[in-house]
Amino acid sequence: MPSCRICKQHYPQSQFVSGNGPRYLTCVRCAVEQGMVDPEAVPQLYSDELVNARMALFSRRYAPWVLVILGWSLYFSFGNGLGIWSLIFFVSLIILTLIAPVIHFFGSARFKANLLKLTP
Ligand SMILES: [Zn+2]
């Protein structure tokens, strides 16, 4: 993958503007920031709203797994000696651990559709 002349980041070829001179080996983001092209002229640009929407989508997708990992680490660090609350915590962790893969599996089609919508 080529690297951008200005920000030195590596991107796929589709993320570069075509042209010679200052436009040579310049990624679309740098080209827009330096005023070489209009944002409307580069449909492949990941705008800030798009980046935020993608981030939100990915965090929604992996939130159950983060909860499972966080819950078990909490349980093993100090959730063990709380009497009845330990049992409630343990049972809800088991349920969450069993449900997380199911949620992940059933959400994959919708996730892919949403991701495709947010890919320029
Ligand atoms: Zn760049």
Image: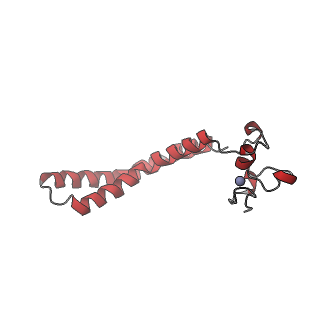
Residue in front for this viewpoint, 49 or 84: 49
Specify the quadrant that holds the C terminus: top right
Outermost residue to the right = 20
Residue in front for this viewpoint, 100 or 29: 29
Rendering coords of residue 106 (x, y %): 45, 47
Outermost residue to the top = 40
Q: Is residue 20 visible?
A: no
Rendering coords of residue 60 (x, y %): 46, 45
| Colour option used | secondary structure
Residue in front for this viewpoint, 75 or 38: 38
Give me the residue at 39% from left, 50% from top: 64
Residue in front for this viewpoint, 73 or 19: 19
Q: How many marks?
A: 0
Give me the residue at 22% from left, 52% from top: 89
Give me the residue at 56% from left, 46% from top: 112
Rendering coords of residue 1 (x, y %): 72, 63
Q: Is residue 82 visible?
A: yes
Q: Is residue 83 left or right of residue 20?
A: left
Outermost residue to the left = 83
Rendering coords of residue 42 (x, y %): 75, 42
Residue 66 sits in which quadrant?
Answer: bottom left
Q: Is residue 95 left or right of residue 3?
A: left
Q: Is residue 59 left or right of residue 115?
A: left
